[in-house]
Image (tube, helix red, strand yellow):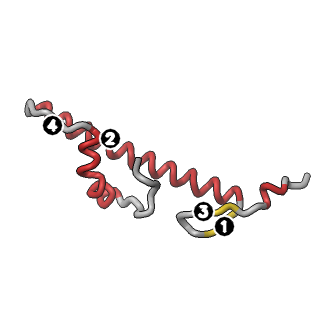
Amino acid sequence: MTQHPAYRAQFYIQELKKYVTWPEYLSYYKERDNKIMQFNNFCLQQWTEYVERKKENQEEPMSYKVYLERYRNSFKKFYGVWDNARPED
């Protein structure tokens, strides 16, 4: 059985600035999605712990959005997140 011509095409990965095959393209973005999800889960876990500490001290915690704006860069350094991640939402 012959392969459809679309699967012989080259697909551009902007972050790597190179063309790859379809399976390589899918694999690359699947791995990136997994890393992004892990990082987002890490940030959420940090915020949850922060909220618990604030509640124990009967203080008002920051919203998740404000907390993330303040600490995202330090989390990236701690977690070892790549510099060319997807654009911020």
Question: Along the polypeptide, which appears first: circle 2 or circle 3?
Answer: 3
Counting from the top left corner in percent of width and height, residue 64 is at 28, 39
Counting from the top left corner in percent of width and height, residue 47 is at 26, 41
Q: Which mark is residue 13?
A: 3
Q: Marks 1 and 2: which is nearer the front? A: 1
Kindly identify the residue that appears in the image at 38 percent across and 43 percent down.
41
Question: Where does label 2 land, which residue?
Answer: 44
Q: Which mark is residue 19?
A: 1
Counting from the top left corner in percent of width and height, residue 1 is at 91, 52
Residue type (three-letter) at the residue carrying disc 1: Tyr
Residue 49 in the image: above or below residue 15: above
Q: Which mark is residue 53?
A: 4
| Residue 38 in the figure: left or right of residue 18 | left
Instruction: Measure how far apart labels 4 and 2 are at the Cα level.
Output: 14 Å
Is disc 1 surrounded by few (<14), some (14 to 19) or many (20+) residues within 10 Å?
some
Residue type (three-letter) at the residue carrying disc 4: Arg
Counting from the top left corner in percent of width and height, residue 28 is at 58, 57
Residue type (three-letter) at the residue carrying disc 2: Leu
Kindly identify the residue that appears in the image at 23 percent across and 39 percent down.
49
Which one is in front, 51 or 66? 66
Question: Along the polypeptide, which appears first: circle 1 or circle 2?
Answer: 1
Q: SS for tag 4? A: helix
Which one is in front, 5 or 81? 5
Kindly identify the residue that appears in the image at 55 percent across and 67 percent down.
16
Disc 2 and disc 3 in contact, CB within 8 angstroms: no
